[in-house]
Each structure stands twice: as structure tokens, then as C-alpha cells.
Image (cartoon, grey):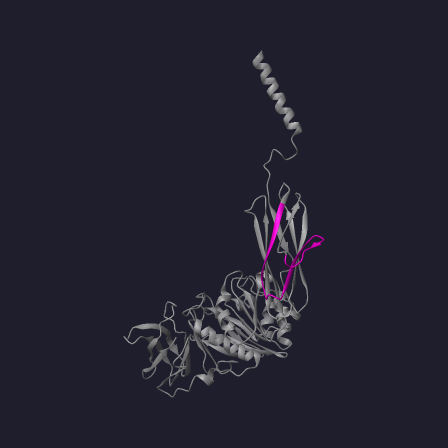
Amino acid sequence: MRASLRLFCLRLFCWCALLVLPAGAATAATRSFTFTAADQGAVTGLSVVTAFTTTVRNTGTVTDTYTVTTVKEMPAAWSCSLCEGTICYPPFIQQISFNLAPGSETNVDIDLTPLAVEGAGVAHVTVASQGDPSLVSSREFRVVTTGVEVLLVDGDGGQSLEDFYAPALASGDVTWARWPRHEAGALASPELEAFAGVIWFGEAMEPALDEADRSALAYYVQHGGTLLLCGQDLAWQACSPASPWYSPQAAAWFQVVLGTAYAADATGAVEVAALPAAPFGSSWFSGTLNGAGGAGNSTSPDALTAVGAGALAQTYRNGNWAAVTSTWGAGRSLFCGYAVESLGASEASLFLHGFLDWALGRASGVDDVVPAAPNGTLAVAPNPFNPSTTLRFELAASGTVQAEICDLGGRVVRRLARGVMAAGPVVLAWDGRDDAGFPLPSGVYVARVTGAGPARTAKLVLAK
């Protein structure tokens, strides 16, 4: 009897406890949030405030406290401040906190103002849950001023391929800024118009160019801009009916604006060389895909054809066409069907410096610093050098050529080129590194070119 009474009381207690538990208490409390932004990039003039509006929403089941932290990567004179809801904080306050009930949200504005100094600035903003420190979300907000000369549009979808362009731009006597397309968003036509030159590379983003991108670039070129667009599969994506991203409008854009069309897959192509129609480097540029110090990502370059106002500018050594130059309206373009970042580091630098000279209307200095090389000789300049030099020689006939750098013991330390080359002038760059990409010590080295004619040698002095 007592046992039955105890069981009855226990059941009654449990039943009453369930009556007074708040709704949802039978389910474990959860913490989660979202941090979203409609726009993360802008091109503006000095002293123009850009307010990037974001939304923090509590998607969990309990009230939580959130901390917003801003880290500035911008000129010291620039201003960056935070606003939450109706409260705005002075620029020296770079961390704020606020509470949100389940299902509620608030707006957080990042006000970024370029002051005194032209250039680019980034605000790195992180939102973290205090209830669960493992819950963190970060975004970047970017402003580029209109005084910058060249814009590098990074279309690699979050990789770090911009690292293969930055050294050439940094040493090219030019002001430049990076625009990560996947984070900073689409560029409007008036934003692109601010730059004398635009280098836009695409890799891994599918499609590499959407309708908004094509519209802005068409306006840019038509109104006097100079565009270098490059990337494997870009032409295939837009122009081949076999591509899931093909459309007649996209194919027409390539034909009208860039003067080009997709011809075939050029898989297996290993070298590119400029033709007389090239806007720069026609007498000296050649490069190796997946060359030393490059990104090594050339797997499916596109073979191109020229249409309309287009002219063939570069060829793959296997005979397919690699690049097309064109004019449209007041502007001009060079479209490369391969990944420029896959070129050897020294070759990519030489190529990009040529583009900068073209875009900014500067006379190219390459032919001035590299002396002519009569048939059968090998010219090197500068010599002594640090950190890089350029080799020039002339081929009387096409054939298989091998160019190497050796130490004084005859050991090959760097292979600059190996393959079939066309008759005519050839220019190769060496950055003072070995085949593994490591800088070589100061000393005397021997450049050796064999094949397609008499062997050529020259001594080089690397002086650090």
C-alpha cells in the first residue's frame, strides 16, 4: 500500500513539474546567429562616407550577447566607425556588444571614409557569440579610391592566386588595388570607369563572368578603358553550347567587346608566344604554362579565334591561338585564354609590366634594357644583376630549343625553357632562383642555349 502511494505521488510530482516548465524546455537550448551584408565593396572619391549595412540575427532559442570587432587595414588617416541600431560610436571604438532575444535582429553599419590619402582600405569585421565563443562569423568591407590607376579584379573564388600578380604590380611603378569579386561583389560601370587599366582574372568561379560583370566591362571598354581579361575556360563557359553557362548573349559579348570566340580545348599546351599583332611584347614575350614560380594551375586553356575587330595576339606552341586583342568604342582589350598566373614567375612579371606600360601609355622599357642579339649570339642585360635579368637570342629557323642556367661546375640550376620555338627573336627572363624556387647565392653563372642552330653561352654575375 505504501509502495503504491509513493508511486502515485512520484507520478503526480512529475506531471505537475511538466505543467510549470516553460515551452521548449524539454528541448536543449541552442545558440546560433547569422551575419549578412548586402554589399561589401565600393569605389569612391576622398572624403566620401560609405555605410556598409549588415544584419545580425539571433537564430537560436535563447537570448545571447554578441561582440562586434573591427580590425582596420587602411591608411592611418582614414576613418572607420561602427553603428548599431540608432547608436553610432566614435572611430576609436572598434569593439561593441549588444543583446538579442531569440528571433530578433539588429543592423550594424560599418562607416568607412577615405581621407587625405588615395588608395585602398579594408575593414575586417568579426561577430562572435559570448554564450558560445566557438560561434564566429567574419566579413571584409573594402573601399578603393578613384585616384588608383590599376584595379586587379580577383575572380578566383577565395583562393590566393592574387599572390602571383601582386609582385609585378608592386614593382611596376603604378598605384593599384585588389577587388575580390566573390567578397566585394559586382562592380558598377561608373566604378570601373575610374581606372586606367583593369586586370581581371578568373579561376574556379562558375561562371567567371555574370551578366552584371559583362555589362560593366562593356561600358568600361567602350568608354576608353584598357582591359586585360584572362583565365582558362572563360571563353568555353560563355561561348560553347556544351557549357552549362552558355548563352547567345554571353557569346555575343565575347565577339563584340573582345573580338574573340572559343575555338577548342587547348589542353596540353605548354608555351605561349606573342605575335606581331600583340599590343605589347610582340618582339620579346614568350612564356611557359606551369612554369617555375607560377601557380601551376594550367589544366584546360582555351584555344581562341579572332572575330570582328579582333586580331590574334599570342599563340600556343602547339599551333592553337592563345590570346586576342581588340578595340571597341574608345577602349581596347587583350583576352588570354589561359591562366596568366600559371606562367613562370619572371615571365608573368615581364608580361604584366608590358600591360602596365600599355594601359598607362608608357613606352615599354624592355627593348631599351635588352640589347639586340645577332644571329648565333646570346645577349644578357642587366649584367651584373639583382634580382633578375633577361636573355635574348635570335633563331634563324624553328626547332627544339633548351635554355639553361648552370653554375661554374656545369650543374644545371635552372631550366628556363625546353620545347619547340618559332624562328625569330626570343626573350627569356631569369629571376635568380633555382628550379625549386629558392634564391641562388651571389656568384658567376653560365647561361646556355642549345638547339635550332649553334650553341650559345654567356656569363652572368648575380651580385647581391
- Residue 386 lies in quadrant: bottom left
Magenta part mainly helix, strand or loop? strand
Q: Quadrant of the C terminus?
A: bottom left
Tell me if I can see residue 165 in this picture.
no
- Residue 88 lies in quadrant: bottom right
Q: Nearer the viewer, residue 237 or 219?
A: 219
Q: Residue furthest front?
A: 92
Q: Measuring 49% from the left and 70% from the top, which residue is drawn there?
A: 167
Q: Measuring 50% from the left and 77% from the top, which residue is drawn there?
A: 353
Question: Please, is residue 4 above or below residue 377 in the view?
Answer: above
Residue 412 percent across, percent down from the top left = 31, 73
Residue 71 percent across, percent down from the top left = 58, 58
Based on the picture, tell me whether residue 68 belongs to the magenta stretch. Answer: yes
Q: Nearer the viewer, residue 409 or 283?
A: 409
Q: Left or right of 146: which side holds 284?
A: left
Q: Residue furthest top?
A: 1
Residue 270 percent across, percent down from the top left = 42, 71
Residue 450 percent across, percent down from the top left = 32, 79
Q: Nearer the viewer, residue 171 or 77?
A: 77
Q: Left or right of 308: which side holds 104?
A: right
Question: Please, is residue 432 above or below residue 109 in the view?
Answer: below
Based on the picture, tell me whether residue 17 belongs to the magenta stretch. Answer: no
In the rendered structure, which segment of residues is drawn in magenta? 65-92
Q: Quadrant of the N terminus?
A: top right
- Residue 436 lies in quadrant: bottom left
The number of callouts visible is 0
Q: Measuring 55% from the left and 66% from the top, which residue is drawn there?
A: 154
Q: Residue furthest left?
A: 409
Q: Nearer the viewer, residue 287 or 362?
A: 362
Q: Measuring 62% from the left and 60% from the top, which residue is drawn there?
A: 40
Tell me if I can see residue 154 in this picture.
yes
